[in-house]
Amino acid sequence: MNRRDLLRRFGAWPLMSAGLGAAGALVLPRSAMAADYRALVCVFLSGGNDGNNLLVPTDGAYADYSAARFDLALPRDSLVALSGTSAGHAFGVHPAASGLATLYNQKRLAFIANVGPLVQPVTAAQVLNHTAVVPPFLLSHSDQVAMQQGWSGDEDASGWAGRSLELLPADLRHSVNALSADNDRTLVLGRASGVASFRPGGARYWGTADLAQPSTAATQSLNRMAQWQFSNDYESEYARTFGAAVEESTIITQAFLRSTTPQGDFGSDDLSRNLRSIAQVLPAFKAMGYRRQVFLLHWGQFDTHTGQRGTGERTQDAQIATLSQAITAFDAAIRAAGMDTDVTTLMMSDFGRTLKPASGGGSDHAWGNHWFVAGGAVAGGQVVGQLPSLKLGGTDDFDRAGEGRFVPTLSSDQVGATIMQWMGLPSASLLGAFPHLANFSRRNLGFMQA
């Protein structure tokens, strides 16, 4: 079985629009410039960010928030105000998130309230009475990370972005549709397609082979190895995977070679370095003719069972400051590159955290959480969805002890489907990428502009 036969066996494999020629030279897509380039950049906050202290009501609901949070509550006068009212409330954000507030007030950022994985719409009363179907493994880090990203708890390990990319029209599919900055890549993994590895600066050097120098002996040898074919299925699959990795690394190397240093006040932390690198290559990918891409990166240590407040680098307070600066710098870089409406940034996390503090000045694992989405194509300046009741044991709390664990009122699938429709996913293909949407009446939450 050769490589072509193996690809034919996996009939859903995306059509390749770029590849390596016989000498290892990069063959670019036919178009010289992508006329309608669109990219999603997903920043996944690892550990479970406490959304209760990211987005806070400043109206009458603040009294419930303050009474329930005790020493975790942010003083009302410290919150950075969001303009107007939305979702029936006035809001402010964590004092370290002033950059996010600026984007919100410029209508470039929207918060998504009380979102999480759902099989079907469900209430706290139904959960308490065991009369509703809920996702398995709630409150488990590894399982909920995968479920937020589209895993359904079965043998299909793919995620909602990866499945969506495979269902795009053929002219939008290519070998670097899906990119991940680490090995935790459920979101961008398709049912039959792989994920390109992305790191700051790219993977230009493979031992002595320099992918930017295809005429050198070492690089030519590497590219010949990438084209080996075998009759044994296992050897053939290994060769195919190796060849795809060389191809993807070569494309990313070429993108970095064509790029320039992005504008924006980026910090020196890992999140800023990754976002700076993405901002650097996005204009190059567009110029090279690639039209749709999803980037995934995980960052942070938000499992704050203790020590959530304070100045230490692992506190939520410090990490929110880093996040706000990095997102603001990334947004500025995208605008400076003339890609204002081409790129959307989505913040996700494992799950929310209990409204009631845990011992040691932290919070415990919960379910519903607050996310945000940013970019020029976002209908910003609004809070999408519904703020839960901030009363311990209230109408949205499914915890029998009244710890403040909220049942989501919006599904992560609804959020993903809204963005992937903006990316070009046909309405007829929605259920192929988001099977649980069959149980929801709203399949587009309306926060993306055409």
Image (cartoon, helix red, strand yellow):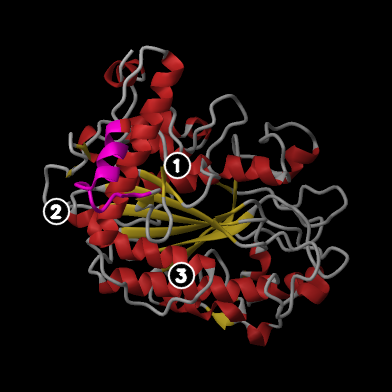
Between discs 3 and 2, the one toward the N terminus: 2
Check residue 305 in the rendering and tell me which mark sits there, or answer none.
none
Amino acid type indicated by mark 1: Val
The residue at 60%/39% (across/down) is 118
Q: Position of residue 211 (x, y in %)?
A: 29, 49
Q: Residues within 10 Å of mark 1 (few under 14, many from 20)?
A: many
Q: Where is residue 387 in the image (x, y as percent from the top left)?
A: 61, 60
Between discs 3 and 1, the one toward the N terminus: 1
Give the farthest residue toward the front: 217
Q: How crowded is mark 3: few (under 14 residues within 10 Å), some or many (20 or more)?
A: many
* Region of the chain picked out in magenta, as a range: 208-224
Between discs 2 and 1, the one toward the N terminus: 2
Q: What element carries label 2?
A: loop
Q: Is 139 situated above or below 306?
A: above
Q: Which of 389 and 321 is in front in this view?
A: 321
Amino acid type indicated by mark 2: Met
Report the residue marked by disc 1. Answer: 188
The residue at 49%/30% (across/down) is 435
Check residue 33 in the rendering and tell me which mark sits there, or answer none.
2
Q: Is 404 situated above or below 209?
A: below
Split into 4 quadrants, where in the image is the N terminus? Answer: top left
Query: Is residue 178 found inside the magenta-colored segment of the image?
Result: no
Q: Is 155 situated above or below 296?
A: above
In terms of image quadrants, where is residue 200? bottom left
Kindly check if marks 2 and 1 are in contact, taking CB atoms under 8 A apart as contact. no
Query: Does residue 117 appear anywhere in the picture?
Result: no
Check residue 327 in the rendering and tell me which mark sits there, or answer none.
3
Q: Position of residue 62 (x, y in %)?
A: 70, 74
Query: Does residue 429 appear anywhere in the picture?
Result: yes
Q: Where is residue 248 in the image (x, y as percent from the top left)?
A: 33, 43
Q: What element carries label 3?
A: helix
